[in-house]
Amino acid sequence: MNRDKIISLAQEIIHEASQSEENAISNFQIEVTDSQIICTWKAHGRGKMDLKFYAEGVHSPWSLSVRDFNHNPLIEDERFHISIVREAIWHARALVDGEKQGEDTGSNVSEPEEPEPEQEWKPSFEVVVGDVKGCYNVHGITDDQSLEPPSLKEEDWEIITDTHNPVVHHSETVGGRKIDPVGFYLSKSGLNLFYNSGWDNYDRWFELREERGYRGATNQAGSLFSFSDDFSKKKEHPESPVLDQPQRNWQGRNRVNPYALVYHEIEKQFYCFYGDFAEGGDCDKYKGRRALGCARSKDMVNWEYLSVDKPMLDIKDIYDLDSEPFPNNNFCNQGRLYAFGATWENDQIYLNIGGSIDGTNWSTIIRSREPMDYWKPVSGNVGRPMAIRVKGKWYRPQNVGTEGGGRGIAIAVSEDVRDRGENHLIFDTGHGGSAGVSRQLFAYKGKWHVAYRQRDEKQWAEEREDYRDMYIAREK
């Protein structure tokens, strides 16, 4: 691709747009990289805008986006940029087509026809289950065994947007505070996400409690997003949060923190494992101890809460199952229990769990076909989150440090689920803070993806680390 022609074209478009008083433009600059050409300008009254041409072979077909100073797409104010967008796309397509045919596409580009309007994306939350090609670790869908394992080479991965432009910003969530990806499932409109949400605006939380007619609606809960295939469009479920009814017989803080999601292929329904502090009744013997509850659903919206009278598991249960990960039995008095993902393997649920007195310094794997009745240990102290099995090996997305002092995502590969495996860095997140343990490795449309949450940079600088955004990287 001839960059000079694209740069010239961009200048021509900006020049034409600047002729209008309404669209007056100044401070026009061009930045050229290997993968894109970014034209930046200042529009009166609208702050800084970015006009981006993505190079052929990296993003295909050609696309153009207009973003504000905070890198948020301008999707509502079409009056300003729609003519620029249309003209840029027409010219870019004509240029690409002309070069493919070996034609001279300098200043003699013929006027192309107006492209067909994109079909409107309509979000759906209706669950699709069964066999769908190109999917792996998408809950409810049988893993496509024809897929090759994810690439372990850094050059084979890219962040879908960029390091400062999340797929979902925390302000776009129902609670306005965080988005921790718990698991993906397939719907009629594309890929949907079940995530751990938290509230920033407590006024809205109290309003929701009144609207839904029950006390104690949790301020941390399970919610749903629906995405278009390229993740450029998204929609929150109108009833989010959907998993938000704490069981007061044992839950001390009235939170329903979803940690893990898995599809039970025999029962044909989804299981969610969530956490809260256990208090009341027998739980008072272990004040302040975090335990796990369990709920299940067929449609990801309506949930049956199974651990009503007591937790599904507390830390003493895990110690009794397998004491190997614990340094001593004092953990049973004060320890906290978390879950770090689940997978369906050998007709059973494999659940990665862990905790400590005040953090997460151990983790192990347990398995069960009937989670409310029987669990069996799989291993001692292992890595987290839960790995998935692809063509005989286990693959786990790992949060690691990079040579430059930043943070990255690696894939750890092992022959045995009980081994931590060897880390292979696949991309640098571009952030200095940890990506946490809320990571999902999955394949969709035949491409491997990693979804991960990241602290909002501005909030993190102000030491408000609970504000979390979600990013997605994928194989090129």
Image: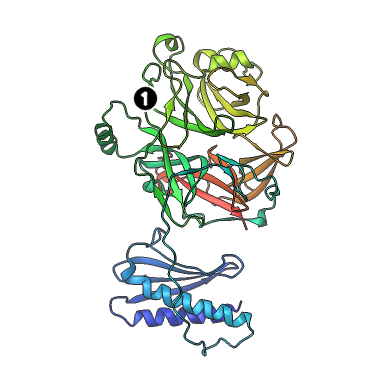
Work out which quarter of the rendered image holds the C terminus and state it. bottom right
Q: Nearer the viewer, residue 348 or 29?
A: 348
Against 113, is 59 above or below?
above
Q: Is residue 295 left or right of residue 82?
A: right
Against 193, is 386 above or below?
above
Q: Nearer the viewer, residue 346 or 26?
A: 346
Q: Please provide percent x and percent y for residue 324.
A: 66, 18
Circle 1 Cα neighbour tier, 10 Å, few/some/many (<14 / 14–19 / ≥20): many
The quadrant holding residue 323 is top right
Q: Please provide percent x and percent y for residue 207.
A: 25, 36
Work out which quarter of the rendered image holds the N terminus and state it. bottom right
Q: Is residue 170 left or right of residue 94?
A: left
Q: Is residue 328 visible?
A: no
At a point 41% along the width and 55% down the height, the residue shown is 122
Q: Is residue 228 left or right of residue 265?
A: left
At a point 28% along the width and 76% down the height, the residue shown is 22
At a point 61% along the width and 81% down the height, the residue shown is 99
At a point 43% along the width and 58% down the height, the residue shown is 121
- The residue carrying mark 1 is 254
